[in-house]
Amino acid sequence: MRTNPLFAVLRVCLILVLVVFAGFPIYWMASTALNVNSQLYNTGQVPWPQLSNLPELLEELAAVPILRWLVNTGLIAAGTTVLSLTLGSILGYALSRFKFHGRGLIGFLLFMTQVIPEALLVVPLYAMFISLGLLNSLWGLVLANVGFSLPVAAFILKGAMDAIPYEIEESAIIDNCPRMGILSFIVFPLIAPSLAAAAVISFFAGWNEFLFAATFLMDRDLWPTSVGLASFIGQYETPLSAVMGAALVFSLPAVAFFLLVQRKIVAGLTSGAVKG
Amino acid sequence: MPKIDFNGISKTFGSNTVIRRFNASVEDGEFLVLLGPSGCGKSTLLRMIAGLSEITGGELLFDGQLANDWTPKQRGVAFVFQSYALYPHMTVRANIAFPLVMDQFRKWHHIPLVNLFHRWQVMHRPEVKEAVEKIAAQLELTPLLDRRPASLSGGQRQRVALARSLVRDPSLYLLDEPLSNLDAKLRTQMRSEITTLHQKVKKTFVYVTHDQVEAMTMATRIVVMNGGHIQQIGTPDEIYDAPANTFVARFVGAPPMNLIPVHITGKTLTAQGATWEHHAGSPSGATSAIFGLRPEKLVLKPVGAGRMKARVAVIERLGAETILGCRLGGGETEGINTEDLIFVRMPGHPGFDWGDDCSLDYADADACWFDKPTGHRLPAVPTPASAVA
């Protein structure tokens, strides 16, 4: 089938507009990072990146423990991902395969966690974390994040597991495969795209989280980058180029992680949408 | 090889009873077919033998030992599913080897990387490789060993499913409508392949189907089921020639047995406006019953040459034979309702056309009698001479 050339041009234009729309803030972030503060606050920003300002930016970043913040962020994101996927896959499997009293109620309650605003839980969680000794601890923060990402992961994985014919599992039972073996040898490989999708969602929930981190972590050495970035904002001065530089560094690992799993995630988010 | 006994096996889902007090036994080395319409409980029964469904009541004995609570592993059965249930992410080789790999599984193999290494290592053991390749060669799967199920045809997938069940050399094979997803030609081919396989391995096969042709061609014994009850157990010939009731008579055979509700007056039978003489025995004391005749036992003759007057209403030419649907008494042929038609199977082309008047005849000994209210088969006793008008 031949496409009308006009449509082809329109399509390219539309894609360009969308790319600019999505990409400009990132470009502006890089451009701002490579402007010096005096330019930003006095003469106005130079719209293109000035690489000559790179040493100055690196000097500014060296003054803050950005590497430690990144490691903390990585630990929180990885902990959230691992815990959400481990518990989410077992929960999703139970919801998908076993009939038990209260299954519907559990599903409903899991949905409710997505309805409640995060800010509403800060105070109760704070009180709870004091008594549990989880305040000012990265593990405590991982637990708080998992509370929000686990239901999403469980639902994504449950949907994917629903699509696996139960006969495949029964066949594995006949072949002497233990129940946990069925999960790891049969179910997980078959829902790999959905696992990737759930991993991305949990990872970014942990990576980008700010409110709980800012509230529960007092120790500067435990801060993740999101809190660290906010700490740049001072009463009299905000070093915008340093903020943007740090934000750029903060974005890179996340982009790398996304690129790693993005081939799988598209299939995961659309799995079960059409008859395969 | 186990002998399986069912002692009053029942299965209920909530308040719905699917199987009621099922009593039967499966002898060592036989090919037992569970035959019945959809929803009659035959697949549920097979799943209960495999240990995939819980038994609600009664006893299931494997060689005299109570096996109700045995795990599928303890029962040592192979199961071929209707949908084949192959592992889509594994190659044909890995699919076939999977039962052997699982036989070597230990608890500590649950550790993620350890199990990967262990499975790889077992797959490469010479005895496993040899077993897989032997079965693959037997079922002509050797060129497909490194392909995934998605790239195989229905028949090839079916053979992979069979290979996977054969590789472990179990004593009992359970097959749940394994041919129903195949086209007619492939089904015929696979039918003979499975029969040959049974003769070769000499193991016990329990085969579930709703296709009476499969049951008749493959079984050494058939259990006909309906509504969770056994209707009849017997060899294919017994089931075909001496159906226990009208359900079996109608279910087995294509076209099914002709069942004509008749009024009996001595040797005279009356039905659908036709009257004819039946010289052999009829049910004793009954004035009405159901008269049954297999289509191939009827002969279509010119008018007056046979004892039942009829008119041809349907003709189905199958090449080697022709199926003719006739209406008794020479009634109208316009109606499309085929329920009251008497089917006749004739070899070749009998030379009758639609709407032709004809007559039907049969040998007296071929008739079957069934009770009208219950549908049970009735013995025919010779009509006393005094009753003849």
Image (cartoon, grey):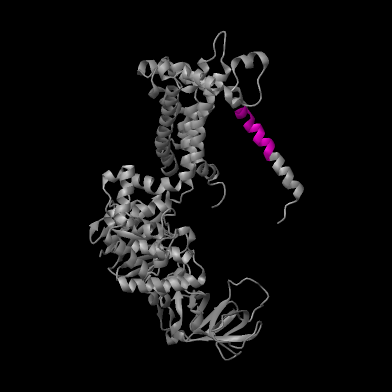
Mark count: 0
Extreme residue toward the left, this view: B64
Query: In terms of depth relative to the viewer, which is nearer, A42 or B145?
Result: A42
The quarter of the image holding the N terminus of chain A is bottom right
* Secondary structure mainly formed by the magenta segment: helix
In the image, the segment drawn in magenta is: A15-27
Extreme residue toward the right, this view: A6
A25 part of magenta stretch:
yes
Extreme residue toward the top, this view: A236
The answer to which quarter of the image holds residue B232 is bottom left
The answer to which quarter of the image holds residue B149 is bottom left
Instruction: Please say if A133 is above or below A25.
Output: above
Please report the residue visible at 50 percent of the width from the left and 74 percent of the height from the top.
Answer: B256
Is residue B45 visible in the rendered structure shown here?
A: no
Q: Position of residue A151 (x, y in %)?
A: 47, 33
Q: Position of residue A233 (x, y in %)?
A: 54, 14
Instruction: Please say if B98 is above or below A45.
Output: below
Is residue B204 visible in the rendered structure shown here?
A: yes
Query: In terms of depth relative to the viewer, which is nearer, A243 or A89?
Result: A243
Q: Position of residue B38 (x, y in %)?
A: 47, 61
The answer to which quarter of the image holds residue A16 is top right
Instruction: Please say if B317 is above or below B202.
Output: below
B78 part of magenta stretch:
no
Q: Position of residue B267 (x, y in %)?
A: 49, 84
